[in-house]
Image (spheres, coloured by chain):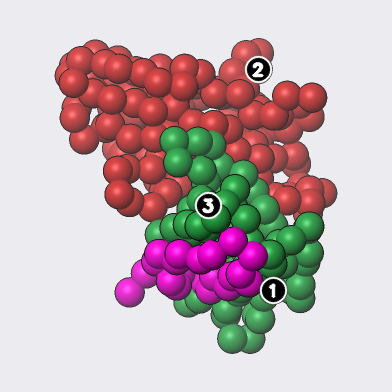
Amino acid sequence: NAGVMQNPRHLVRRRGQEARLRCSPMKGHSHVYWYRQLPEEGLKFMVYLQKENIIDESGMPKERFSAEFPKEGPSILRIQQVVRGDSAAYFCASSPQGLQLTIYGYTFGSGTRLTVV
Amino acid sequence: KNEVEQSPQNLTAQEGEFITINCSYSVGISALHWLQQHPGGGIVSLFMLSSGKKKHGRLIATINIQEKHSSLHITASHPRDSAVYICAVDPYGGSQGNLIFGKGTKLSVKP
C-alpha cells in the first residue's frame, strides 16, 4: 500500500522555464495539500485541493503558481517562469475526507527539491 | 512573534538519554501535529493530538489545551532518532491542511 508519491525527487530548471511537480495521494485519500520549505525556513502551507476543486489557495503566490487535482491522475503544482527564489523543497500531503478518521493525521510525501539555476 | 514556537532550536543528546521538545502556540486549534524530518528526506507524521497524551513505541506526546503547550518525549534515545522534529497546528476557523508550522528542533543523538 504505497504512501504519498511525489516525483520527481529532484528537479533542476533554468530561470524562465516551467516546473511541474506531481503528487499521487495515498490510496483512499481524496484531499491533497501542498507545502513549501524554503532553505533555512519552516514549512508554509500553499494550497488544499479535492478532486477537480481548489478548496483553499490562500498560501499560493499570486503569480506564476497554479495547482490542480484532476478527476484522473495526480495532483500537479505548476510554477511558470521560475526564478531563483523558487528554489525550495515542495511537499505534498494527503488525507481522507475526515481527518479524525486517521491516527496520525496527514500523510506526507518525500518531497521534490527544486533548484533554479 | 511566531504563532508556533518550539524549544530548544537545537538539541544534542547522548544515546539512551530522555529527550523533551516543547511547543507553544498562541492560536485556538482543532489539532496539533508532531512531524519528523530526516536530512534530505521526507516528512513523517508522528502524532495528531487534540487532548491528553499519546504513546507510540519510545515516543510520547502530550498536550495541555488550556496552557496552549505540547511536549514530545523520546525515551531511551538512539542515534537513528537524529532528525528535525516539527510541531504544527490546525487553527480553528482554518481550512483542513492549512497548518501553521514551528521552525523545528534539530536533534542529534550521539552514540
Residue B74, given in percent of the width and then of the height, sits at 65, 65
Q: Which chain is red?
A: A
* Quarter occupied by residue A14: top left
Look at the numbered disc 3 and give the secondary structure of its residue.
Answer: loop
Q: Which numbered marker is on residue B82?
A: 3
Q: Quadrant of the C terminus of chain A?
A: top left
Residue for point 29% across, 37% down: A62
Residue B42 seen from this side: yes
Kindly identify the amino acid type of the residue bearing the numbered disc 2. Lys
Whether residues under marks 2 and 3 lie with C-beta atoms below 8 angstroms apart, the answer is no
Look at the numbered disc 1 and give the secondary structure of its residue.
Answer: strand
Q: Which numbered marker is on residue A71?
A: 2
Which range is magenta? B1-23
Which residue is the site of mark 1? Answer: B62
Q: Relative to B109, does residue A1 appear above or below in the rendering?
A: above
Can marks 1 and 2 be said to lie on one chain? no
**Magenta region includes residue B18:** yes
